[in-house]
Image (spheres, helix red, strand yellow):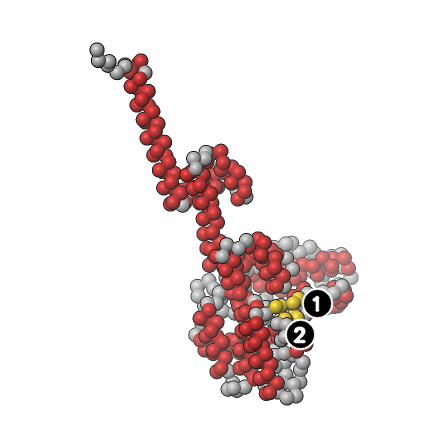
Amino acid sequence: MRKAAPMTRHVQAYLSLRRAFGFHLNIAGQVLQAFARFADREAAGEPFTVEMALRWAQSSSTGKQVTAARRLLLLQPFARYLRIVEPLTEVLPNRLLGPAQYRYIPHIYTDAEIQDLLKATTDLRPRGGLRAQSVLTYLGLLACTGMRPREPLRLNRGDVDLQGNILTVRQTKFSKSRIVVVDPTAASALREYASFRDRRVSSPQSAAFFLSDDGSTLTYKKALWAFQYLRRKLGWVKKQEHQLPRLYDLRHSFVCRRLLVWHRDCIDVQVALPSLSTYLGHVKVTDTYWYVTAIPDLMNTVSERFERFVCRRLLAWHRDGIDVQVALPSLSTYLGHVKVTDTYWYVTAIPDLMNTVSERFERFVYGAGKEQQDVQQNHPAYGRPSVSR
């Protein structure tokens, strides 16, 4: 049996093919190259096997199941490609180590927390330098636009229209570009920063909008380090199932506040959501729906509004004397319930509705009892009332 070609060669060929079709594969490429080095070191000349993939996936320094599962998920398309050029390649089953995604409960910043974070930037060194102003403006922009943490740092000066209050975000996630309209107050803050930046740095080394004190680009690594320093300084810690507050949670907080405002103002979210999805740069509107289920405060608001809707409908029917038994199947279909008994749950779960049902039931029983009494008094079997002569 001939030996298989080195895994590093197969990985390079696979990445070259996929990138020729426009895929960047930056993270996936690094992961696959790490696998290739492992395979060539541990099983040189051997074909790809499930056992080899499992050993590599579970060798992660984190030791987490979800990390190992994510490694296998990135290996799967490569394994399918490899089976074409190396027939002895074993098929890698789906979800061999369980789900590869873990949905973290995001931290939703309060207004006070955002204010504290922005104020704390004044302590960044050098005091009064460009770094503090850059981080302050960067964090403020994340909070008021919901942009992804890396997107503002990729802005060049030509991408920021301070007259039209428009940012042009180029070639971001999924190679998409989009226009982000900012509030006039945010545009004013950007103008102040640009003026301060130009006074501090006369000969910038970069065309980037956000700069460091030496005139170089404010990179994501620098911004993340500054944020982590501020987080420690403010004493923010993990809370139960939540992770530490992250930069990305500013995006979650922006979406949460917008959806909460819409729900509380009784705006039809089904109609408004596509515009928010476009603003955020989501490929599918379903990506934006994720925020509804990920944020407890928002779920509570949505649930309360839904219950109020159902309660009002059932109360109106009861008070108008409409036969709920006849009308309920149509409401059940409207709500998307599989069984009409799912809709009956609201009758027992909502106190106001139970009170109305009980009152109506009592009136029915009283009326039925009165009718029965009249029947007994007038029916021959019970005798007739005596007639005085």
Against 41, residue 69 (above or below) is above
Q: Is residue 86 left or right of residue 327?
A: right
**Residue at the location (61% across, 57% down)?**
274
Residue type highlighted by circle 2: Asp
**Residue at the location (51% across, 82% down)?**
124
Percent coordinates x, y for residue 45 in the rendering: 73, 65
Against 36, residue 97 (above or below) is above
Locate residue 209: give its quadrant: bottom right
**Residue at the location (48% across, 67% down)?**
109
Pick the front one: 181 or 19: 181
Locate residue 101: give its quadrant: bottom right
Work out whether residue 65 can be spotted: no
Percent coordinates x, y for residue 336 in the rendering: 54, 43
Quadrant including the C terminus: top left
What is the number of the mark on residue 24? Answer: 1
Percent coordinates x, y for residue 157 in the rendering: 66, 78
| Marks 2/1: CA–CA distance | 23 Å
